[in-house]
């Protein structure tokens, strides 16, 4: 009797140990696909392209040759550096570009929000922007700090549609330069960090990205501020970065496209949303083919291949490059050439001034 009890216990324990060794972390589970289907990896885009969402630092002093070599390998004719800063720093950058690679780089200026609320802040910011454009800036980039962390001189969060900023957006319309804006962050960063959250892994590996209704405000509120601001300035062209965080709800994004004809979108960092719904995404690209731009965001040359493959091929179930964005696989949209050309360069040429069109003939 005793002997059989011990045996049962031993067997039970062995069973538990076995189950434990078979369990593993979500981060570790990375099965190799056994699916055999045609594969068409794309290292170089089918047509030359303009990346409207890139960040390069230290461009004022840098030797640009290495960058040009990487761009040529991808077929990137023009890179838009959104981190232009302003004033002297920006001028140094545009001077270096003019001297060494005048056709290949475009710089967007940034606003310094320091001191907003002080007497004369708006006028000074507008003056700085006008000067930056004279020095060669071709657009304005607004970072997500507006809406999330920018505070005025009284310590209050500055809303994206704050009237103290109106003169800046209006000036961009007058100067005919686009405003590329990144507002808030993906909605799941505001949701409970649990097993139902699609961005659980990103929040686990980047805990600083977690947000909440009071940190600093509800997601929808910040997004609504942005849309009100777009509507208030119909003569200014806005490029809503990252598909305005609606790449996972293209029916809703379509409604927004209808409401705001001055809004363009770019798909930096959200290609994994398009690559999981190739049919719906293709319909969206067909309908809004004149208002979608190619953007990537982080400068990792080898990751562009995923973007090209989603846009150009009809491939099925191929891997994405960053598990914390997408633990799912990609499908290609198989876009026709005339739409690809618009996405890759024609739309950008239309709204970003002073890009040499002869690069695309
Ligand atoms: Zn960015």
Image (cartoon, rainbow, N blue to C red):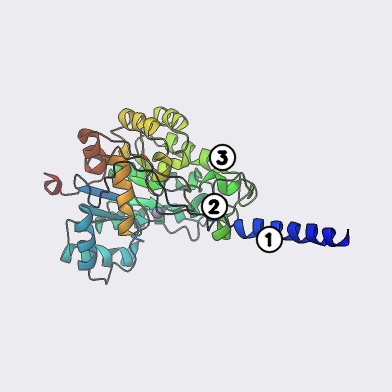
The residue under the point 65% across, 58% down is 18
Where on the picture, by quarter, is residue 47?
top left
* Label located before the other in sequence (3 or 1): 1
| Image quadrant in which you'd find residue 1 | bottom right
Report if residue 294 is visible in the image. Answer: no
Does the residue tagged 1 have its C-beta within 8 Å of any atom of ligand 1? no
- First in sequence: mark 1 vs mark 2: 1
Q: How far apart are marks 1 and 2 (CA)?
A: 47 Å
Crowding near pointer 2: few (<14 within 10 Å), some, many (20+)?
A: many
Q: Distance between the residues labelled 2 and 3?
A: 12 Å
**Quarter that holds the C terminus:** top left
Coordinates of residue 73 in the picture (x, y in percent): 20, 57
SS at circle 2: helix
Q: Is residue 180 left or right of residue 20?
A: left
Residue 344 in the image: state x and y as whole percent.
24, 43
> Percent x, y for residue 65?
20, 67
Of 86 and 185, which appears nearest the observer?
Answer: 185
- The mark that comes first in sequence, 2 or 3, is 2
Residue beneath disc 1: 17
Secondary structure found at label 1: helix
Residue pictured at 84% horizontal, 58% vertical: 5
Which dot marks residue 148? Answer: 2
Location of mark 3 (residue):
220
Instruction: Estimate how packed mark 3 is, as few (under 14), some (14 to 19) or many (20 or more) residues with alpha carbons within 10 Å.
Output: few
Residue 326 visible, this angle? yes
Question: Front-most of 125 and 284?
Answer: 284
Helix, strand or loop status at disc 3: helix
């Amino acid at each position: 009797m005793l002997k059989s009890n011990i045996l049962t216990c031993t067997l039970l324990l062995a069973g538990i140990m076995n189950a434990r060794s078979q369990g593993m972390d979500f981060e570790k589970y990375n099965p190799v696909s056994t699916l055999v289907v045609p594969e068409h990896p794309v290292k170089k885009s089918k047509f030359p392209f303009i990346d409207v969402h890139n960040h390069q630092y230290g461009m004022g002093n840098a030797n640009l040759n290495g960058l040009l070599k990487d761009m040529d390998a991808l077929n990137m004719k023009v890179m838009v550096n959104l981190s232009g800063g302003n004033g002297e720093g920006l001028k140094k950058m545009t001077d270096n570009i003019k001297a060494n690679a005048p056709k290949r780089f475009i710089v967007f200026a940034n606003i310094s929000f320091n001191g907003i609320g002080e007497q004369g802040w708006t006028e000074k910011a507008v003056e700085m922007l006008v000067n930056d454009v004279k020095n060669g800036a071709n657009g304005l980039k607004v970072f997500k700090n507006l809406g999330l962390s920018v505070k005025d001189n009284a310590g209050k969060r500055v809303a994206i549609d704050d009237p103290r900023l109106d003169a800046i957006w209006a000036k961009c319309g007058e100067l005919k330069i686009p405003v590329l804006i990144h507002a808030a962050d993906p909605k799941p960063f505001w949701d409970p960090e649990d097993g139902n959250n699609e961005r659980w892994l990103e929040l686990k590996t980047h805990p600083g990205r977690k947000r909440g209704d009071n940190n600093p405000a509800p997601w929808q509120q910040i997004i609504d501020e942005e849309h009100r601001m777009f509507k208030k300035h119909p003569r200014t062209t806005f490029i809503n970065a990252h598909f305005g965080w609606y790449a996972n709800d293209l029916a809703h994004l379509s409604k927004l496209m209808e409401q705001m004809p001055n809004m363009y979108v770019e798909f930096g960092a959200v290609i994994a949303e398009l690559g999981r719904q190739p049919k719906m995404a293709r319909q969206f690209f067909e309908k809004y083919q004149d208002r979608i731009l190619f953007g990537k965001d982080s400068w990792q040359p080898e990751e562009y291949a995923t973007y090209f493959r989603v846009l150009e091929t009809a491939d099925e179930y191929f891997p994405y490059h960053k598990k914390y964005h997408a633990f799912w696989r990609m499908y290609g949209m198989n876009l026709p050439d005339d739409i690809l050309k618009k996405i890759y360069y024609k739309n950008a040429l239309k709204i970003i001034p002073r890009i040499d069109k002869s690069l695309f003939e």
